[in-house]
Amino acid sequence: MHFARVLRGAGLPVGPNKVIDALAALQIAGVARREDFYWTLASVFLDRREQFEIFDQAFHIFWRDPRMLERVMALFLPRVEGRTGQEPPPPPARLAEALLPNAKEPERPQAQEEEVEIDAAFTFSEREVLQHADFETMSNAELAQAKRMIAELRLPIPEVPTRRLQADPRGPLIDLRRSLRAAMCYGGDVIPLERRSQADRHPPLVVLCDISGSMSRYSRMFLHFMHAITNDRDRVHTFVFGTRLTNVTRNLRHRDVDVALKSVSDAVADWSGGTRIGVCLKEFNLRWSRRVLGQNAVVLMITDGLDRDPGVGLGAETERLHKSCRRLIWLNPLLRYEGFEPRPAGVRIMLPHVDEFLPAHNIKSLVELGRTLAREPARRRDGPKRARLAA
């Protein structure tokens, strides 16, 4: 039970049901051999491959491996460069917090004096360091600070001309109805010409966020991002999907982020489950595309592309979504890896039908998203290039 608490504090979804299952499995496998004990707990507590490193380090630390315990304690001591070989990477910060909740956080290294300039742009800033940190590796304190920084983000979406006309004293078009109405004030002797021009308005923004198990650590941060942009402008529509599609636009309208996220968690029934991107996109295209994709809408699709059944209409539904909107931008956390290649079948199928393929794993990537939205898109001229990359 205490070991499950450590894993839950480190971010793994370990609840009372898994503890009961682990006890039942241990009665069958036994505790005579450490290796059997290790893999029995791993088979019950782990849901995906990304959780294995945290479980492995937590197991050896909790069950008294002296070397691993020294590595955790080294996080809270000054680091000294030695002549030995390269040491294995230390455990994540949130694992150290789960094991030693009362320990003080290690002080960050101060910038060298010769690097400090008078210009404030070159001085040390903890916020700037936090912008480059991956959401997956942040501690609980850093996650709280990152959420406050995300609440301050704004997405500059440029305005586009619409078919509607508005009154404009310098407009190129003459408003005949307003001109005749103004002439009545002069008895018809003088007819002042009233003018009008096309009205500009920012297009609707539609966000489709993946909340499956492979995206659980990132989707919670993206919900804070979606709450910030939903309350910053009008005509923002937000959807979450895993095995089904859920419209959470009204849930995120509440000003209090805690109340909004609580409402989202009550409305969503497939949190941290499987992924059926093709089925969810089909439902969106049938039920919601005509309602929310009018007037040159911009679509942000946040997913890693790991679909459970990529062959079931995924390419056709993504192509239909691409043709229904003005701009389709795909935010993928897997792009945080430098050697990323579109090997999963879902990624290869979806990639030729998007306008922008961007990373989304830290605050800097969200800032870069704002700069991308501020630029005019290259209107779908690199589709063959992305198709060759996906092939």
Image: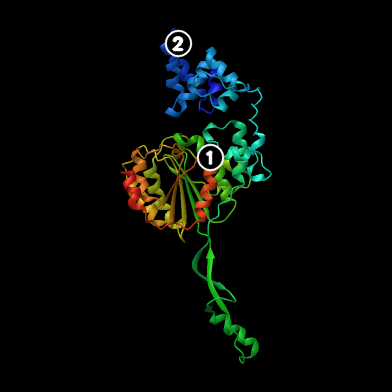
Q: Quadrant of the C terminus?
A: top left
Which color scheme did the rendering employ for the protein? rainbow
Tell me which residue sits at (45%, 34%) in the image.
Answer: 213
Image position of 230 with respect to 182: above or below: above
Mark 1: give few (<14), some (14-19) or many (20+) Cα within 10 Å.
many
Q: Quadrant of the N terminus?
A: top right
Q: Earlier in the sequence, mark 1 or mark 2?
A: 2
Q: CA separation, marks 1 and 2? A: 38 Å
Tell me which residue sits at (53%, 68%) in the image.
Answer: 199
Whether residue 185 sits left or right of residue 83 in the image: it is right
Whether residue 125 sits left or right of residue 89 in the image: it is right
Question: Is there CB contact under 8 Å for labels 1 and 2?
Answer: no
Splitting the image into 4 quarters, where does residue 256 fall? top right
Amino acid carrying label 1: it is Asn
Residue found at the far top of this picture: 32
Q: Position of residue 329 (x, y in %)?
A: 44, 50
Whether residue 388 sits left or right of residue 58 in the image: it is left
Check disc 2 and report the residue beneath it: 34
Q: Position of residue 250 (x, y in %)?
A: 55, 49
Check disc 1 and report the residue beneath it: 362
Amino acid carrying label 2: it is Arg
Residue found at the far right of this picture: 118
Mark 2: give few (<14), some (14-19) or many (20+) Cα within 10 Å.
few
Q: Position of residue 273 (x, y in %)?
A: 44, 34
Tell me which residue sits at (46%, 60%) in the image.
Answer: 296
Image position of 19 with respect to 163: above or below: above
